[in-house]
Amino acid sequence: MGLLDRLSGLLGLKKKEVHVLCLGLDNSGKTTIINKLKPSNAQSQDVVPTIGFSIEKFRSSSLSFTVFDMSGQGRYRNLWEHYYKEGQAIIFVIDSSDRLRMVVAKEELDTLLNHPDIKHRRIPILFFANKMDLRDAVTSVKVSQLLCLENIKDKPWHICASDAIKGEGLQEGVDWLQDQIQAVKT
Amino acid sequence: MLKKFDKKDEESGGGSNPFQHLEKSAVLQEARVFNETPISPRKCAHILTKILYLINQGEHLGTTEATEAFFAMTKLFQSNDPTLRRMCYLTIKEMSCIAEDVIIVTSSLTKDMTGKEDNYRGPAVRALCQITDSTMLQAIERYMKQAIVDKVPSVSSSALVSSLHLLKCSFDVVKRWVNEAQEAASSDNIMVQYHALGLLYHVRRNDRLAVNKMISKFTRHGLKSPFAYCLMIRVASKQLEEDGSRDSPLFDFIESCLRNKHEMVVYEAASAIVNLPGCSAKELAPAVSVLQLFCSSPKAALRYAAVRTLNKVAMKHPSAVTACNLDLENLVTDSNRSIATLAITTLLKTGSESSIDRLMKQISSFMSEISDEFKVVVVQAISALCQKYPRKHAVLMNFLFSMLREEGGFEYKRAIVDCIISIIEENSESKETGLSHLCEFIEDCEFTVLATRILHLLGQEGPKTNNPSKYIRFIYNRVVLEHEEVRAGAVSALAKFGAQNEEMLPSILVLLKRCVMDDDNEVRDRATFYLNVLEQKQKALNAGYILNGLTVSIPGLERALQQYTLEPSEKPFDLKSVPLATTPMAEQRTEGTPVVAVKQPEKVAATRQEIFQEQLAAVPEFRGLGPLFKSSPEPVALTESETEYVIRCTKHTFTDHIVFQFDCTNTLNDQTLENVTVQMEPTEAYEVLCYVPARSLPYNQPGTCYTLVALPKEDPIAVACTFSCMMKFTVKDCDPTTGEADDEGYEDEYVLEDLEVTVADHIQKVMKLNFEAAWDEVGDEFEKEETFTLSTIKTLEEAVGNIVKFLGMHPCERSDKVPDNKNTHTLLLAGVFRGGYDILVRSRLLLLDTVTMQVTARSSEELPVDIILASVG
């Protein structure tokens, strides 16, 4: 950290960095969401299934996000926990059109919430009920019922309906997350 | 060794290495910094360096701790610091086999390899291929194909080289990238072209035709990269080696490369031609003349390469190198000592006897300045010289001893000692001087192996010299001064002197009595044992227990003893029930490399017999045959190599029986054989007792059947016999694809070649270190002598070779080597006859026009002697 860095930090010019974990089942649209949030010149054209994880960065109005975009495939889900400790917020993405695997998503969410690194922390969780553009998608309210989100008492959470391909609903979620993180900090 | 280590410690103790005394646990603790935000690239890179250092020092990281460190490291991907990122790539590669779930970084790496930063792309490709296994390869295949044809050379090269590594585990996937590699092979970048060609070659390696096509295609178009040319030359010479013929376009290609504008290519071509087996002088000439040109090059590396290659050529074709003698003479004074050494040793090989003295003087002037490796080269050259010019041994021997006195490492000293020992063996005149010089050497020798070896040699050769007592002082000094292994060796050597010299016996006994007080168990045991044996004053005991050691196979003895202790019985342990040690085949040293110690496959030979014994013991019919006496060393083929069935026979000799083991393979894929036996018809009084069939013989799965015969009882002398063999079986046709056989079969027969049983099958080779003692031990109770004329044999060497092969006995005291210019020779042979009777044969040979042979055989029983004499006649 150079002197200049520290100075700009004091003046609030340099944005605060936060670590965010992006979790969810495979094919739920995690990488697409993160890709859409990046500045348009840094977006990649084709999105392929993530193997392992990838680190992406984007900025909101007052924060600089470093996202650990984790792979959602079954065989990699047990690797998520290696990154729980550093995460200051969680984005959990759900494929709203995949009713069949909603129970799987719930199971993964419960495991996540009961993990010792997560359980006792007041860590904000943002849910994206994604793929709203699809015809058989259920509403965000229905999703929150299916996942029993009302049972989460000790953490701030918020659910957003989103369509990552068009980018609808993403900004609303990120704004909520930003507010939450700043509230925790101050 | 210990001393050396200390010295090294002192030298590096100055603190030049900042990573010394690193603690693994402390470093792994530090690695937790990776989890902090924001990341400090400098600090993290330093810790990664420490981890890499530890891994490279051989520190073992447990899977859990490695995985933990690895996952912490993955978080460093959020930093964009180039140094840190490079350290990450290195760490990924190093930890890819230690940590679990390393595929976690796959996406991060693919992102880097397709990204904009060229500096990241190559290393990312390499790291990615390191963590990818064959199941994951499909997922990154698309990226790899793109990377191979990438226009950035470093990326393309990385992808090509990584593909080469992947080829080992996922040949089928990488094979699909040939088109991309083809495209890369026409690249302008010399490295990319080279790597692409390498990949193409390795993909097609098993397809000779494709390789030939590839070479002709690329040589027609010409290549940009000299590296690629070198590779092509190597591939071409390998093809040539397999073909064996010389007039193919491949050889023309290599020869045309001698005129290439790159020196590298020219040298590679010359070296390839030189290394081709069975190269004629005419083919060699252009290569040698190119090397000759290099000898006067201003570049030291070229001169070195040239003279080193010429040195190799000189071993096989000294005459071809004579043309370069003048250039080599100039190199003798080269300022680079390595070049000078090689030049001199080459000249030693090509030069005449008269120039040896001069060259030796020259080389001794700078012997102290060259490294051990080159000193070994010099020693090898001298050893070759000694064989060529036995008369020069005095000069050479002196030179060797002055080298022996100087400082030097183990390999170097061993080469010298090997060389001296081989001179002593070849040349009896040099024995006395050689032994006394070796005595001096062990006075101050830090290498246990060499000291014990020399002591053994002294014990063997010393007593036969004119004045044996002078060696005693040297040997006893070792007992006083050295550590236990050498002391034990010295005690054994002393005992051998006592066993062979009556007049020295009292003094030896006194010395051995002193050794009984030794601190070490082994030394004490040996001394007590020898003392007791010697005090009996019986020649037979001396011969059996001191001069000639145990001849049984050690693993066999161990097993037999264990068996004996498990089943306690009244009977004393019978040493004859232990299988004999099979004398290793590779004992004859190869002529070209006399100094290189031949690694003897003793362990393997011993276990081969063990395996047979176990297999045979599993067959119920063979119970009660007693211990396996001998298995024939190599299976005999009873069929031509490319017939319907491949049958090979191994003979197992027991005390009164022989078991023939037939290893059968069915090479017809539309047949299954059942109930396979080999019917045998003996010509002599042998009696076939039973057949053990191979139940079923499907396509290409080897099976075994046995035939048991009893040795003739009425006429025990007729041991040699020819058996006519016929294979009988039931054929069932089957579907070649599924292997399903019909229910119905029919009987069939197949005639095999005849099988011979010779005297050699009844005798096991045994090495007697001291033949004379063994000869006296057996005594002349059953001694017989006869004289034969070998009318078809014209030289002594031929006669010796034939006798050794025919009787299957072990030549003792190097009597299988016939000295030049002599017309008489005595061949000494030792063996053990089936049943465990020692048999010794002394045959005196006389060469006039034909060879006349007087054979004297001794044994502890009459039968073996009769058999030997009957069979020779």
Image (cartoon, rainbow, N blue to C red):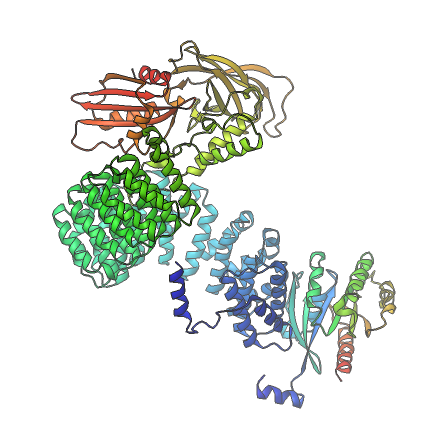
**Whole-percent x and y of residue A135?**
82, 61
Q: In the image, is B667 to the left or to the right of B138?
A: left
**Whole-percent x and y of residue B670?**
57, 25
Residue under the image location 26 percent in, 20 percent down: B855
Residue under the image location 56 percent in, 63 percent down: B92
- Which of these two is toward me, B702 or B505? B505
Furthest toward the top, the residue is B714
Q: Quadrant of the C terminus of chain B?
A: top left
- Which of these two is toward me, B322 or B496? B496
Furthest toward the left, the residue is B354
Q: Is residue B716 above or below residue B375?
A: above
Residue under the image location 51 percent in, 54 percent down: B163
**Whole-percent x and y of residue B599?**
38, 42
Residue B693 visible in this rendered orientation of the protein: yes
Q: In the image, is B775 to the left or to the right of B205?
A: left
Q: In the image, is A46 to the left or to the right of B453?
A: right
Residue A4 figure quarter: bottom right
Q: Quadrant of the N terminus of chain B?
A: bottom left
- Which of these two is toward me, B414 or A12? B414
**Whole-percent x and y of residue A74?**
72, 57
- Which of these two is toward me, B387 or A165? B387
Tag count in the figure?
Answer: 0
Residue B529 figure quarter: top left
Residue B289 visible in this rendered orientation of the protein: no
Residue A112 figure quarter: bottom right
